[in-house]
Image: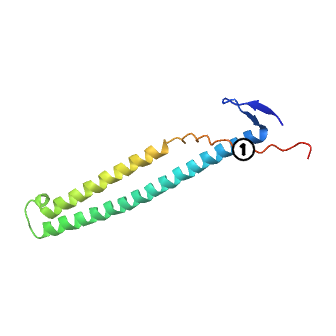
Amino acid sequence: MEEQGSPNGKIKTTGEKLWDSTRKTLHVAGFQANKYKRIVQKKIDLASLHRKIVASHGDLGKLIDDIRESGAPDILAKNEVQELFHTLDNFKADAAALEQEIENIKVEEAPEEEEAPVEEAPDKDPEQ
């Protein structure tokens, strides 16, 4: 087998190099899969928030129309309307935070794999 010296002074065979390469590839693939899973979960949460925002807009429109029909002055100063505005603002802030989290996850890089201690294989007697 072909042998090369590694930075820590140990000699790696072709099989060991292949195994190291496979481990690194699996590590990166696992990281990417986990990253994708987290992004999908955040997007599901974001879609749910957008549905809540749409529902709140509908509630706000209905409330404003009901108040207008009752002939009340200064519709926007009503407590119920202000509460819905506050709820909408919270939903929008949460949505913006989720969008930022998604962007942060997208730019994450795979952490370097920790070097596992190399186990020494028992020496085989070549005469066997």
| Within-10-Å neighbours for mark 1: few <14, some 14–19, many 20+ | few
Q: Which quadrant: the N terminus?
A: top right
Among the 4 quarters of the image, the one containing residue 9: top right
Give the residue type at disc 1.
Trp
Residue 114 horizontal side relative to residue 99, left or right? right
Q: Position of residue 95 (x, y in %)?
A: 35, 53
Instruction: Tell me: residue 54, above or below residue 10.
Output: below
Among the 4 quarters of the image, the one containing residue 85: bottom left
Q: Position of residue 14 (x, y in %)?
A: 78, 38
Q: Position of residue 128 (x, y in %)?
A: 91, 47
- Residue found farthest to the left: 73
Q: Please tell me which residue is depicted at 25% across the width and 66% down the height of the picture.
A: 59
Report the front residue among 86 and 35.
35
Instruction: Tell me: residue 76, above or below residue 6.
Output: below
Report the front residue among 59 and 46.
46
Report the front residue among 116 and 89.
116
Instruction: Tell me: residue 53, above or below residue 24.
Output: below
Q: Position of residue 5 (x, y in %)?
A: 73, 29
Residue 124 horizontal side relative to residue 95, left or right? right
Q: Please tell me which residue is depicted at 74% across the width and 41% down the height of the picture.
A: 16
Q: Please tell me which residue is depicted at 82% across the width and 34% down the height of the picture.
A: 2
Q: Please tell me which residue is depicted at 71% across the width and 32% down the height of the picture.
A: 10
Report the front residue among 105 and 84.
105
Q: Which residue is mark 1?
A: 19
Residue 40 horizontal side relative to residue 73, left or right? right
